[in-house]
Image (cartoon, coloured by chain):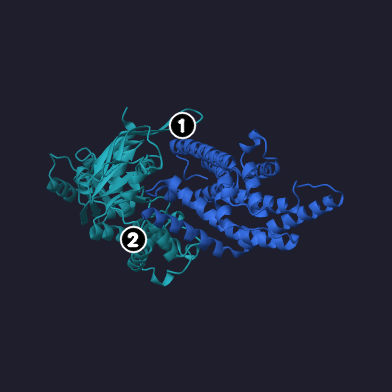
Amino acid sequence: MRRVHVFFAILSRFLIEIKRYPFNTLSSIVTLYLVFLLLFAGARYAQGFGINVFGEGLEALVVGFLVWTFALAAYSDLSWEIMREAQQGTLEQLYMCPFGFPFVSLCWVVSSFLVSFLFSGALLGLMMLTTGKFLRLPLGTLIPLLFLTLAPIYGVGFVMAGLALVFKRIQAFFQILQFAFVPLLFLPAEAGWAKALPLTLGSRLIREAMTEGKTLLALSASDLLVLLGTAAFYFGLGIMVFKLCERVAKDRGLLAHY
Amino acid sequence: MTAIVVENLVKDYPTRKGPVRALSGVSFQVEPGEIVGLLGANGAGKTTIIKILCGLVRATAGKAEIFGIPADRPEVAKHVAALLEGSRNVYWRLSVEENLRFFAGLQGVGLREAKRRAAELIHFFGLGEKRRVTANLLSQGMKQKLALACALVKGTPVLLLDEPTLGLDVEASHELRGFIRELALRERKTVLLSSHDMGVVEDTCRRVIILARGRVVADDLVSNLLSLFRTRAYRVALRNGLPAEVLAELTPKFPSFRWLPEERALHVELWPSQNFYELVDALRAAGAEIEGLSRSEPDLEEVFLRLVRSEKEAP
């Protein structure tokens, strides 16, 4: 029960800060929507020449873009948060949670996922209105699929967070990484090696759920198993690297420094 | 059970030029309900000890425990809260109430209990009018009070305070010292307080641990340390001053004679074999007119300086 109180404390702080910075919140949705409009205009222009840039058409673009926005939040939120906490001097206080900092991070990740879900819902609404393609939203299938698809990216987020603990300023690395996710979203997920990559298989399954209305039971069981395996592998790897970086930071007394 | 146990604690910080030793075998214990001061110059190792006890820095060797729990285990936070960087320990965009509820929640305290504790602390620290104000709009003294309240809202029996009065003006510092003393008495908290401000330690702690170059050079009650350095030193104010020839005449008998021209007073330390009246008689015989007399008492600052200097001079 005490862990639940920790989670609600972190979630409520997350929501209070969103409320305190309304311009930042609003501008992040508007920016993402503008980026989508640019991609959409490009895709329609290419379609005029008979080129299908995003494989399966506009639905693929909408779903791919949606997963990408989730992925952006998933890998950057935690590391940004760690940098910000270290900068303002509150990181050490978070480390003094009796349930350990990994639990605090996990609460942060879940809070961030829930908030991303609300924001991305709004963005999805705007995208569907723009494209005129109305996708299905089977939440019971979408939420677990999204979580499993994003788990490897949360793993990457933990790696970044660990690096942030030791090196503090890693913003430049962020910029490169966000574009590295794009090809992963649109790679054909049929090949075995591609299925083992983060995002690739998950984004295809989400596409199937949103465009064809497939439920979890209707999706290929082996694909779901591979998705679960890659989620556990990358997430576990991320936690391991984070723990290693944390050890270095504690050895060098770097937790409070920025 | 002993609240804090530190045994042969060693900390080397790895650097590119090789390890830098911050602590060299520090040992001490703190019993429940004690307020102990950690006194030392910058770099003496005070903050390192506190951070090891919070589990924020890994010790190279030795033992650090809070109520028998090794400090590097997260569970230790059930028993210990800390004020580490003063006002930087709170969220500046959260109000006083929101900060308190957040830190209570982080400890696993339910919302109803968190609200009750927050209300109690807001009242105790006199922050009632500011409870809905965001921390960035508070004065430095109020931010510091809020940071202390955020450590207290966790309800742990042990409190570690690293330089709690740093950056505060005299009035705010006195007020905060009062709060710390009252808390220790009222709630029987075990407090380990680090500072390089002698006044803060002398004012709030019964016992003091003096650190120099990562070593404990003294660990005793403040009163014992003061009496250890109490000398038979006197300050004698003379109405008409002291002519140089008289001073020269008396110096062989009282080698510690020191004339303080601005105060028109004489500072003298008597040997154990010397009688106080010998001094008075010698001055009267020399024609000096005594205007006032007081005994020079050492303060914690003097004790600290003597101990640290003797440590530096040690091979």
The reply to whether dot 1 and dot 2 touch (C-beta < 8 Å) is no
Q: Which chain is drawn using blue?
A: A
Q: Which mark is residue B198?
A: none
Rendering coords of residue A203 (x, y %): 64, 46
Amino acid under disc 1: Pro
- Please report the residue visible at 55 percent of the width from the left and 53 percent of the height from the top: A113
- Would residue B107 be seen by someone viewing this image from the given angle? no
- Please report the residue visible at 26 percent of the width from the left and 56 percent of the height from the top: B184
Rendering coords of residue B148 (x, y %): 37, 57
Front residue of B289/A113: it is: A113
Dot 1 and dot 2 within a common chain: yes
Vertical comparison of B6 with A118: above or below: above
- Would residue A139 be seen by someone viewing this image from the given angle? yes
Q: Which mark is residue B14?
A: 1
Q: Earlier in the sequence, mark 1 or mark 2?
A: 1
Front residue of B125/B167: it is: B125
- Say which chain tag 2 marks: B
Rendering coords of residue A249 (x, y %): 47, 38
Rendering coords of residue A166 (x, y %): 52, 39
The C terminus of chain B: image quadrant = top left
Vertical comparison of A190 with A16: above or below: above
What hue does chain B carry in this figure? cyan
Name the residue carrying label 2. Answer: B174
Amino acid under disc 2: His
SS class of the residue under badge 1?
loop
SS class of the residue under badge 2?
helix
Front residue of A32/B275: it is: A32
- Please report the residue visible at 30 percent of the width from the left and 58 percent of the height from the top: B180
